[in-house]
């Protein structure tokens, strides 16, 4: 499968970037594996590592808007406790991590990107507890649109989050604060969530690796689910190995989870082994009618297809028969937002758009939502045969280039929905069906912002996606490319 005109697309540049001061800044771009290894090897203390992250946040985040809360004193105290710890240390010992606003952090308000809560959470969400148990240090909370409803990280409560590669452009969303924090090197990893593309979309806009895992792979505790069958939590990282390291810490169910994934082996082992010869189907056709991808995104897919063919995989054009997911997605989306609004202390403080979503979506009763969950499972069964033909499907992540910030400024529900729906054209299907899917960096477009492609796998297919993603990363490295200093 050859695309001669596109062979050069997606090749990453290697810019020389200024680096802000702050100890120990030589580890700024080392990622999770590099920073954890430096602490483990005695090259740096946990306190020094966390202090460096906090210094970068103070120096740079005023222009980015990635963080809504910085837990400086608590983080330094936690780092000191890590340094005082004797005996066995966890795989993330001393590594600073950021947490999206929708995930509970003990002692901090879970805002969902809005103003409706004022009382701090009494306990960590289970994924945060697991991160801390592995030695990670939580340094702050990252921005999101209210309740993650929109694929743009903008809210009335916290303003806009800006893309580190171009401060005038969006990070997309909804995990855009996390994406900006990691892409700018403020922290090596941040936790996000994905209910329609919210890990993959900002990863694609910011040059990161973002894997949405199989439904039920990561616990939603203390909640029984995240937007019913649509959502999952997961990390955004600079590299495939970093993602695997964090997933091996946070993955696994809890007794109260509604959904559970099948058994798979170590994600780290998967990221470190060759994928073998795979059957790769390639399609740039949008699952959503009337949406056409940007030519830069088509070229990135074709260039990646050529690279995979050169690596020995069987690559061919695929013609998926995508089902219409509207009836399965919309009730779960509305029901998920309603369930989160119902937990607020002050629901009247929500954005007008949120109130309008609930008003217009009043028909999405609990009975309708349960029907939508069953409908999604039926659609998943219709999609499964595709993965009897192909081990992996290669597509764009998003149709269009990241827009200028301010997409939601003054926009009511209708305008916000019209601007948002095309953005999730390639991603939301896999939330409905639950299949794992990853955004993989693919170089840079003419506008200087990152390009990405999406790899989709069969049920419980994360090990295949990780192995193939790591092979692509080795053949076409991306983690060395860093954005400009936002103060420049």
Image (cartoon, rainbow, N blue to C red):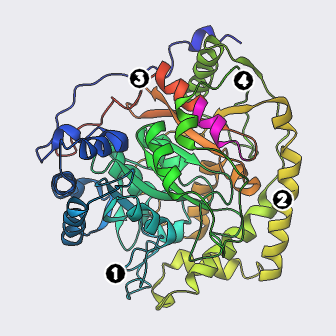
Q: Distance between the residues labelled 4 and 1?
A: 47 Å
Measuring from the top left, give residue 36's x and y in whole percent.
31, 46
Residue range in magenta is: 460-467
Seen from this angle, which residue lies furthest front? 87
Measuring from the top left, give residue 167's x and y in whole percent.
30, 46
Residue at screen point 45% across, 19% down? 11
For the stretch drawn in magenta, the main secondary structure is helix
Please give the label number shown on residue 299: none
Asked if the residue under mark 1 is in contact with the one under mark 3, i.e. CB atoms within 8 Å, the reply is no
Q: How crowded is mark 2: few (under 14 residues within 10 Å), some or many (20 or more)?
A: some
Magenta run includes residue 464: yes
Where does label 2 land, which residue? 377
Q: How crowded is mark 3: few (under 14 residues within 10 Å), some or many (20 or more)?
A: many
Magenta run includes residue 325: no
Measuring from the top left, give residue 378's x and y in whole percent.
88, 57
Where does label 4 land, which residue? 278
Residue at screen point 69% across, 76% down? 335
Seen from this angle, which residue lies furthest top? 4
Please give the label number shown on residue 107: 1
Tell me the quarter of the image containing the N terminus: top right
């Amino acid at each position: 499968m050859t695309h001669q005109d596109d062979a050069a697309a997606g090749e990453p540049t290697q810019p020389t970037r200024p680096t802000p001061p702050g100890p120990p800044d030589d580890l700024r771009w080392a990622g999770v594996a590099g920073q954890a290894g430096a602490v483990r090897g005695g090259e740096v203390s946990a306190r020094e590592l966390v202090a460096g992250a906090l210094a970068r946040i103070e120096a740079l985040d005023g222009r980015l808007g990635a963080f809504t809360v910085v837990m400086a004193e608590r983080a330094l105290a936690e780092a000191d406790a890590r340094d005082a710890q004797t005996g066995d240390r966890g795989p993330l010992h001393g590594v600073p991590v950021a947490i999206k606003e929708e995930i509970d952090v003990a002692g901090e308000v879970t805002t969902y990107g809005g103003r409706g809560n004022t009382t701090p959470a009494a306990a960590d969400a289970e994924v945060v507890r697991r991160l801390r148990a592995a030695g990670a240090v939580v340094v702050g909370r990252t921005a999101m649109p209210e309740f993650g409803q929109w694929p743009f990280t903008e809210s009335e409560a916290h303003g806009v989050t800006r893309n580190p590669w171009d401060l005038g452009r969006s990070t997309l969303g909804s995990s855009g604060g996390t994406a900006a924090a990691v892409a700018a090197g403020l922290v090596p990893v941040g936790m996000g969530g994905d209910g329609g593309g919210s890990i993959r979309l900002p990863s694609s806009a910011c040059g990161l690796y973002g894997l949405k895992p199989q439904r039920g792979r990561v616990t939603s505790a203390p909640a029984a689910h995240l937007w019913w069958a649509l959502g999952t939590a997961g990390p955004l990282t600079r590299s495939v190995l970093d993602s695997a390291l964090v997933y091996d810490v946070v993955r696994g169910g809890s007794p109260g989870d509604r959904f559970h994934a099948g058994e798979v082996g170590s994600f780290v082992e998967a990221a470190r082994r060759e994928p073998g010869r795979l059957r790769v189907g390639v399609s740039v056709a949008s699952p959503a009618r009337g949406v056409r991808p940007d030519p830069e995104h088509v070229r990135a897919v074709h260039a990646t297809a050529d690279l995979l063919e050169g690596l020995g995989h069987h690559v061919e054009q695929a013609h998926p028969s995508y089902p219409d997911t509207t009836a399965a997605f919309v009730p779960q989306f509305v029901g998920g937002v309603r369930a989160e609004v119902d937990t607020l202390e002050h629901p009247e403080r929500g954005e007008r758009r949120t109130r309008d979503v609930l008003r217009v979506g009043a028909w999405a009763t609990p009975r309708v939502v349960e029907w939508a969950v069953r409908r999604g499972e039926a659609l998943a069964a219709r999609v499964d045969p595709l993965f009897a033909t192909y081990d992996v499907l290669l597509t764009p992540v998003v149709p269009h280039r990241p827009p200028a910030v301010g997409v939601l400024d003054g926009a009511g529900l209708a305008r916000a929905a019209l601007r948002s729906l095309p953005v999730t054209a390639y991603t939301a299907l896999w939330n409905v069906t639950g299949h794992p899917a990853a955004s993989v960096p693919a170089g840079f477009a003419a506008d200087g912002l990152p390009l990405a492609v999406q790899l989709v796998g069969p049920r419980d297919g994360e090990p295949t996606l990780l192995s193939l993603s790591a092979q692509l990363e080795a053949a076409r490295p991306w983690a060395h490319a860093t954005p400009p200093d936002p103060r420049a």
